[in-house]
Amino acid sequence: MQITTDAAASWAQSRADLTRDFQHDAEVYSKYWLKGAALLEALPEKPKRTGDQARSAETILTAGRESREAFLRRHAQAVYAALTRNLTEFVRAEPLAYAAADLIPGLVPTRAQVEAQSARMQSQKDGIEVDQGIFFAHILAHPDTGTHFCHAMLLPRAEALAALPEFQAKGAVDLGTAAVIREGKAATVYMRNPRYLNAEDETTLQKTETAVDLAILDPATELCVLRGDQVDHPKYAGQRVFSTGINLTHIYHGRISYMWYVTREMGFVNKMMRGLARPDADPDETYGGTIEKPWIAGVEHFAIGGGCQYLLTMDYVVAASNAYMTLPARKEGIIPGAANMRMWRFTGDRIARQAIMVGRRLDCDTPEGRMICDEIVPPGEMDAALARVIASFTDSGVVSAAGNRRAFRVSEEPLDQFRRYMAVYAREQAYCHFSPALIGNLEKHWNAQQRKM
């Protein structure tokens, strides 16, 4: 089938007006979206399109996104109610999105459609996952559905609950790209991606969240520690490094899905910030319905991007004197998680904007670095320093720790503020992830074309 710009424009203009009837609109708009998807599928793959074909694809994608925005602006709450049995069931981000694809075909891409795109380089994708970002943004925009969705993402993973007896018995669980080990009164989570300097990618996401869940759930420990494990990179072989953040090489090669961002930010990063939710209690700070412990980070060499984002959720940060922090969002072309909401509370607005928007580096052992890092120690003394800090936190017990953490958050970042931030983040990160500017940034600042997988 030959798709012309006129055919794409004619389809775009055929969109029906919305009514107040959810079922009616869902049926009508589903047919519209499926026809648009068929038109897009009939085009050659992105790199092989002519100028007219590229313009047709852009018309189809833009009209589809605009119509989804309109549909969800009116019916997001009804969609979420149907997916969660009127908010009586908790569904995590990935199954929620794919259930929505079954409920209203065309609203968001199916798993098969996303998997087909995942085999392509990032620059060769059509960005169909932007529709997932639009979907999550509208769910999060409403206090009732958004809070319920946040609650679902704060519950312990099933994998963690299954592994908890082993951790209680052995005091250690090795998950491959993450591990959790009981060390005295602390449960230490180790980030393990040695080839990539403990970077984050699809191989680390679920394992890290499971390790975080286990550390919080462990009844035999009083606090949690986050560290990077030893790496095998020639420059740092045999040394611990904290984290280089998201694996930019994997982004460039199309190996990071959009869903990764939402799952990470609403999952284990938010769990370090707020603790684990209970299914039968509201996780909002005013209800105290979370299971939580203090978190301490040990930063060696660097905390780049996502690594720096972790520090903004910690109760205490110990850093080596030669370590530094960056949030190179400008060079990456993405939004640095929740750092835009959190960092200014530590450094003030100007330094936060400089770090995020113009790539300012913060050395830990400087006045600016000490706004985030509580204690600076010589590089060889990290183990001893962490042991000392753990002892100081636990010598008198930590009965009030959860209460004090909630008391800080109720003024700094209540759950509703996080929900509203994520409503913006969900949509904007989707567009960033599939922007041509992201590819240009990675080629210019990361030399992505020359990097090996």
Image (tube, helix red, strand yellow):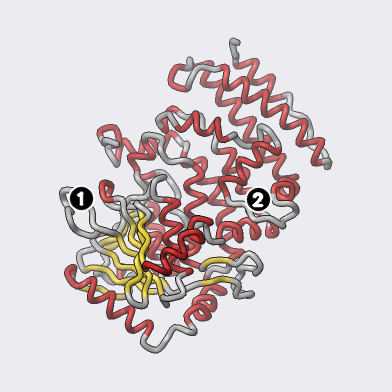
Residue at image location 43% in from the left, 29% down from the top: 119
Q: Dot 2 surroundings within 10 Å: few (below 14), some, or many (20 or more)? A: many
Residue found at x 46% / y 69%: 216
Secondary structure at badge 2 equals helix
Structural distance between the alpha carbons of marks 2 and 1: 42 Å
Asked if 202 appears above or below 373 in the picture, the reply is above
The disc labelled 2 sits on which kind of residue? Ile
Label 1: state its secondary structure: loop
- Residue 315 falls in image quadrant: bottom left
Q: Position of residue 423 (x, y in %)?
A: 59, 52
Quadrant occupied by the N terminus:
top right
The residue furthest bottom is 396
Discs 2/1, front: 1
Q: Quadrant of residue 389?
A: bottom left
**Residue nearer the viewer, 389 or 65:** 389
**Which residue is identified by label 2?**
139
Q: In this view of the protein, can residue 188 be seen by the observer?
A: no
Residue 100: % across, % down: 66, 41
Q: Which residue is mark 1?
A: 232
Q: Is residue 365 left or right of residue 39?
A: left
